């Protein structure tokens, strides 16, 4: 599978939306680094971002909000947050 900016961004977005777990994100990143079919023009950026994601389960590395924001910005995406009050029934 060819990995593009969109592929990497979608994994980050899926994690932020709780569609995948941290373990699933890390597992995907580790797999992607072992089977690198990165889009050639973005290969360096993809290796850097995905390589970092592969270490996200190590406490010393972790992932901060700023990491997500920076990675997505570099991949061509802007984060926009919408916060709504909790509705209780």
Image: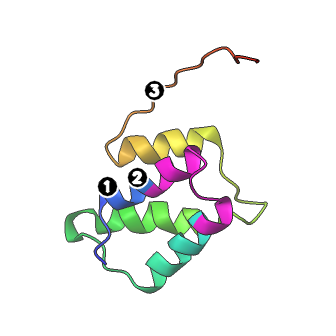
Instruction: Tell whether label 1 touches label 2 (CB within 8 Å).
Output: yes
Q: Which residue is mark 2?
A: 9
Instruction: Tell whether label 3 touches label 2 (CB within 8 Å).
Output: no
Question: Is the stretch drawn in magenta largely helix, strand or loop?
Answer: helix
Helix, strand or loop for disc 3? loop
First along the sequence among labels 3 and 1: 1
Helix, strand or loop for disc 1? helix
First along the sequence among labels 2 and 3: 2
Specify start and end residues of the magenta stretch as a single range: 11-24
Q: Which mark is residue 6?
A: 1
Vertical placement of 70 versus 29: above or below? Answer: above
Vertical placement of 64 versus 22: above or below? Answer: above
Alpha-carbon span between mark 3 and mark 1:
17 Å
Quadrant (top left, top right, bottom left, bottom right) of the C terminus: top right
Residue extending furthest toward the front:
89
Q: Nearer the viewer, residue 53 or 85?
A: 85
Q: Report x, y in % for residue 52.
A: 56, 63
Alpha-carbon span between mark 2 and mark 3:
14 Å
Q: Report x, y in % for residue 80.
A: 45, 26
Crowd around label 2: few <14 · some 14–19 · many ≥20 (10 Å) = many
Crowd around label 1: few <14 · some 14–19 · many ≥20 (10 Å) = few
Vertical placement of 6 versus 43: above or below? Answer: above
Q: Which mark is residue 80?
A: 3
Alpha-carbon span between mark 2 and mark 1:
5 Å
Residue extending furthest toward the bottom:
34
Q: Report x, y in % for residue 25.
A: 57, 64
Q: How many marks?
A: 3
Quadrant (top left, top right, bottom left, bottom right) of the N terminus: bottom left
Residue under the image location 52 percent in, 72 percent down: 28
């Amino acid at each position: 599978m060819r990995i593009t900016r969109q592929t990497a961004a979608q994994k980050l977005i899926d994690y932020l939306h709780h569609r995948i777990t941290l373990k699933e994100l890390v597992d995907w990143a580790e797999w992607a680094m072992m089977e690198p079919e990165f889009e050639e023009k973005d290969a360096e950026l993809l290796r850097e971002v995905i390589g970092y994601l592969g270490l996200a389960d190590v406490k010393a590395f972790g992932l901060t909000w700023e990491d997500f924001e920076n990675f997505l910005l570099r991949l061509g995406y802007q984060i926009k947050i919408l916060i709504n009050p909790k509705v209780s029934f």
